[in-house]
Amino acid sequence: MVLEATMIVVDNSESSRNGDYVPSRWDAQADAVNMIFQAKTQANPESSVGLMTMGGKGPEVLVTLTTTDLGKILDGMHRTKIQGHSHLATGIKIAGLALKHRQEKSQRQRIIVFTCSPIREEEAELIKLAKMMKKTNVSVDFVAFGDLAASNTKKLEVFNENVKSGDGSHLAIIPPGPMLISDQLISTPILGGDGTSTRGQDGAASGAEGGGGGDSFEFGVDPSADPELALALRMSMEEERARQEKQEKAKQAASKDKMEGIPEEGGENQPLLDKNGEASGSGGADPSDGKRDEDKDRMDTA
């Protein structure tokens, strides 16, 4: 599987409050971020994923590139405040700098951008940025949802055309619907096209056909029938898994410290031989015992 370093850029602008996507634009992004992290790290355990926002007063890196700690990703999403407008170009530039300073230089560089708000940058600025990303071998994927005005989609298409190198960069436009963004994202080239994720494919097929039992779906719940319940169950499972992993690490660290604090039997400073050349400790003979035995064997000549 491909060894990648991926920075996920989420849109936490005021537009992400809207509820036209289930359960809301922001919560739908959170679920998709969770799914992308799992897909990337399961495809290659040495791949790394980072997280940042591009709304508010300016872009902010929430989690630097990490390989195994899903809890940091979830915590970063929970700490994020929804405010201001998006800074698309600046967010992509900062994500590119984070990838440039990755520890494993053999990892391919990828940025996945979620955008659901109006794009304020001019088309010429985006073209210049796209060419710069292409020059530094950074693939940029867009997940466009929410504000799908013609001006927005045109800017994203122009950016995609100028950054695309082979099959490295993709544009996924997801309209509102009863399904979660994460479930629709699986069938796009960003994840499903290269086979890095198979989560939910059987369930989606069964839901489309209208048949099949509940066992075909994750947790036995059809996301298209009850998307809010499916999202709540999925997020609850991931938070519990992250909590258990953290608890297990703490337990192992405490056990290690306890073992290091136990002194060796007999003490480390006790000499091996006493002053008479005998073995020290319980195995050594007591000189007074020999003296008493000698007194017993002596004949009374009085």
Image: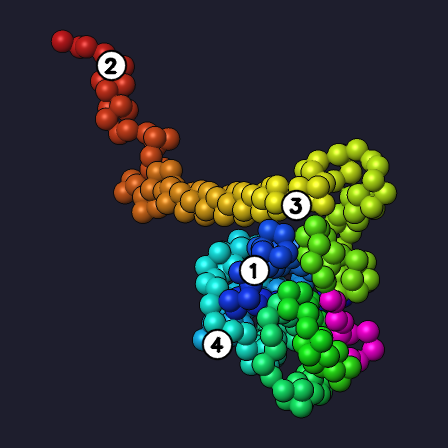
Q: Determine the secondary structure under disc 2.
A: helix
Q: Which one is in front in this view, the residue at disc 3 or the one at disc 1?
A: 1
Q: Quadrant of residue 113?
A: bottom right
**One can see residue 207 in this view:** yes
- Specify the amino acid type for callout 2: Lys
Quarter that holds the N terminus = bottom right
- Specify the amino acid type for callout 1: Asn
Task: Give the residue pinned by disc 2.
Answer: 296
Q: Which one is in front in this view, the residue at disc 2 or the one at disc 4?
A: 4
Query: What span is in magenta?
Result: 164-173
Q: Which one is in front in this view, the residue at disc 2 or the one at disc 1?
A: 1
Quarter that holds the C terminus = top left
Residue at 47% in and 68% down: 83
Within-10-Å neighbours for mark 1: few <14, some 14–19, many 20+: some
Q: Quadrant of residue 192?
A: bottom right
Reply above or below: 261 against 67: above
Lower sequence index among marks 1 and 4: 1
Residue 166 in percent (x, y) is at 83, 78
Q: Which one is in front in this view, the residue at disc 3 or the one at disc 4?
A: 3
Lower sequence index among marks 3 and 1: 1
Disc 3 versus disc 1: distance between alpha carbons?
16 Å
Reply above or below: 28 against 100: above
Q: Nearer the viewer, residue 12 or 63?
A: 12
Residue 186 in percent (x, y) is at 75, 56
Q: Quadrant of residue 30?
A: bottom right
Task: Give the residue pinned by disc 4.
Answer: 58
Q: Determine the secondary structure under disc 4.
A: loop
Lower sequence index among marks 3 and 2: 3
**One can see residue 64 in this view:** no
Please tell me the numbered disc located at residue 18: 1
Disc 1 versus disc 4: distance between alpha carbons?
21 Å
